[in-house]
């Protein structure tokens, strides 16, 4: 059996794990990151897209709000290419109590969170589609953040500093001896091959799956309450500013403009299993109604896709306080020290947190590891830029066209919705060395526009066939896999224009190409 050695094994390739491996690599540790799937295929690739200003937590969870205020400013500096400065508004809708606005202002001042009350007229001038019945409005420094770009930049930066990133490698067991955890056995999910990783330290950044990893070390009494939330992407930007309801955190109270779409979310309900998070019709209806409260006519706009994610809300039986409602669990993070808690050395788990605070979370867990090792090395992730972010301005809607239009005239345009030319597509397919069109989607946003792959994905399949020399059967399998994935996010919201689009896609793929039966 193959065996690899490293100073540090990082489990989980979401924002937290990618932040951790980048931090380790910058501190000169030889690190390996493993994920059971592609990078950011867990919660990080299924979140709401909001770079929090802190406003959402400022009244109820001031510690979480403070962390957001600090990290929001750092991330804008460090990963500008991943962030759009949309700004944010907190608005008191006709259903909300205007007095909450005073609590909000007072808490924001206490947290040094920049905010200002503006007139309703000014808010409507900025966002003409907003509910004209709003009673108060406050500005905040919300933004939107692209998780796939963030995670891929961090992982790429780490590999440039010597780290190894193994996607589709699932941890199936932890190795432990009397001195603690010494690494893990992982299985390559594409080939079935198993390999051992011997590591001086193991950092568990597997989010909502963290308890499963902890149990592999024989540790009991640790659980994660998967807090399920659904989100719906509308096919264009109904607003250009993040719009939040100015009330205690509730369902469907934030609308985030991200890239070419706007995303309404989210719910927060306890799920039994992080891998079983189906979207129900009631949740979709509720979300559309909630959108209507912020932007009248919301239901008539075109809903493009729905998905669900799971919050990693950690629950420790040894902790004194336990929350019954997932919304009452603090959004702050904590490093679980298994040496102190369970007498298992060289093993730490990250619990809780948000994508906005991934950098701080990574710093905290790597600092804790250094402390245990007695090898204090300073963290530099608040000053060093990962690739593509050095000297870059903050992302704007036109950034992609500006970057690509120089060679667009000689290029075949493959995905019109997301401006992906053939050259970029081929380069990404080669670089990623993947035969999975869904991996390419996460790298380039292939097939993520209104047609949901209807016009681009058969072209991309042909190109994948040529580039990777997949035989016909493998290429067809890859195409079917992609269509299946897209369908999952479309069927619960099939009405209006998106239903028409789905019928057209169906005619193309079933009626014209007969994809189910192509060999
Ligand atoms: C509905 C919803 C909306 C949200 N919106 C926002 C928002 O707008 N802004 C914000 O800042 N935060 C938001 N969050 C929170 C944020 O998305 C998460 O806190 C963050 O993405 C968690 O990142 P992570 O890396 O810890 O976990 P994940 O991204 O889930 O990464 C964990 C990884 O571990 C891997 N893994 C699991 N088991 C194994 C194994 N056995 N072996 C190897 N790998 C394994 C998984 O494949 C996964 O990739 C939202 C969360 C939800 C659920």
Image (cartoon, rainbow, N blue to C red):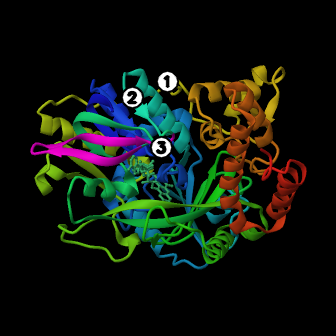
The disc label shown at residue 189, or none:
3
Dominant SS type (magenta): strand
In the rendered view, tell whether residue 402 sits above or below residue 266.
above
> What is the x, y in percent for residue 362?
32, 41
Q: In front: 348, or 472?
A: 472
Of all residues shown, which one is farthest toward the right?
A: 512
Segment colored magenta: 170-190
Q: In front: 41, or 197?
A: 197
In the rendered structure, does residue 188 fall within the stretch colored magenta? yes
In the rendered view, tell whether residue 374 sits above or below residue 232.
above
Whichever of callouts 2 and 1 sits on the residue coming sooner in the sequence is 2
Q: What crowding class fits label 1: few (fewer than 14 Cα within 10 Å), some (14-19), or many (20 or more)?
A: some
The answer to whether 40 appears left or right of 296 in the picture is left
Q: Are marks 3 and 1 in contact (CB under 8 Å)?
A: no
On the image, which quarter does residue 300 sit in? bottom right
The disc label shown at residue 164, or none:
2
Q: How far is mark 3 from mark 1, CA to CA?
A: 35 Å
In the rendered view, tell whether residue 82 sits above or below residue 212.
above
- Residue under the point 77% across and 51% down: 450
- Residue under the point 72% across and 40% down: 473
On the image, which quarter does residue 385 sit in? top left
> What is the x, y in percent for residue 467?
70, 25
* Cβ at disc 2 under 8 Å from ligand 1: no
The answer to whether 363 appears left or right of 125 in the picture is left
Q: In front: 517, or 311?
A: 517
> What is the x, y in percent for residue 456?
79, 41
Residue 382 visible in the current orientation: no
Q: Secondary structure at mark 3?
A: loop
Q: Which residue is mark 1?
A: 390
Q: Secondary structure at mark 2?
A: strand
């Amino acid at each position: 059996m193959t065996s690899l050695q490293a100073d540090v094994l990082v489990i989980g390739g979401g924002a937290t794990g990618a932040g951790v491996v980048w931090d380790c690599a910058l501190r000169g540790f030889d690190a390996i990151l493993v994920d059971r799937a592609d990078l950011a295929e867990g919660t990080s690739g299924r979140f709401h897209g909001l770079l929090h200003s802190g406003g959402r937590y400022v009244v109820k969870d001031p510690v979480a709000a403070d962390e957001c205020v600090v990290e929001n400013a750092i991330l804008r500096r460090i990963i500008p290419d991943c962030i759009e400065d949309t700004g944010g508004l907190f608005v008191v809708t006709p259903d909300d109590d205007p007095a909450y606005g005073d609590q909000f202002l007072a808490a924001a001042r206490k947290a040094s969170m920049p905010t200002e009350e503006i007139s309703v007229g000014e808010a409507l001038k900025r966002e003409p589609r907003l509910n004209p019945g709003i009673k108060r409005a406050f500005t905040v420094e919300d933004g939107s953040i692209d998780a796939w770009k963030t995670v891929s930049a961090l992982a790429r930066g780490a590999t440039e500093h010597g780290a190894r990133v193994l996607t589709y490698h699932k941890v199936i067991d932890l190795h432990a001896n009397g001195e603690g955890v010494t690494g893990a056995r992982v299985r390559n999910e594409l080939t079935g091959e198993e390999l051992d990783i011997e590591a001086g330290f193991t950092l568990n950044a597997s989010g909502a799956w963290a308890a499963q990893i902890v149990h592999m070390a024989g540790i009991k009494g640790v659980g994660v309450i998967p807090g399920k939330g659904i989100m719906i992407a509308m096919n264009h930007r109904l607003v250009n500013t993040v719009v939040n309801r100015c009330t205690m955190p509730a369902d469907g109270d934030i609308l985030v403009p991200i890239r070419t779409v706007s995303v309404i979310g989210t719910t927060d309900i306890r799920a039994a299993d992080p891998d079983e998070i189906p979207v129900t019709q009631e949740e979709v209806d509720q979300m559309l109604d909630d959108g209507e409260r912020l932007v009248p006519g919301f239901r008539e706009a075109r809903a493009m896709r729905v998905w669900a994610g799971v919050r990693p809300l950690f629950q420790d039986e040894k902790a004194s306080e336990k929350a019954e409602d997932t919304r009452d669990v603090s959004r702050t993070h904590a490093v679980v020290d298994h040496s102190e808690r369970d007498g298992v050395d060289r093993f730490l788990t990250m619990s809780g947190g948000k994508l906005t605070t991934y950098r701080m979370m990574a710093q905290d867990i790597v600092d804790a590891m250094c402390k245990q090792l007695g090898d204090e090395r300073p963290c530099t992730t608040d000053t060093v830029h990962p690739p593509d972010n050095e000297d870059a301005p903050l992302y704007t809607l036109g950034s992609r066209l500006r970057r690509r239009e120089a060679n667009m005239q000689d290029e075949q345009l493959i995905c019109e919705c997301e401006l992906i030319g053939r050259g970029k597509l081929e380069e990404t397919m080669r670089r990623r060395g993947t035969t999975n069109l869904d991996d390419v989607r996460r790298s380039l946003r292939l097939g993520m526009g209104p047609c949901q792959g209807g016009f681009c994905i058969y072209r991309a399949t042909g190109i994948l066939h040529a580039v990777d020399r997949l035989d016909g059967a493998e290429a067809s399998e890859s195409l079917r896999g992609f269509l299946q994935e897209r369908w999952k996010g479309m069927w619960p919201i099939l009405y209006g224009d998106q239903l028409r689009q789905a019928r057209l896609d169906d005619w193309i793929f079933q009626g014209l190409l007969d994809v189910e039966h192509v060999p």
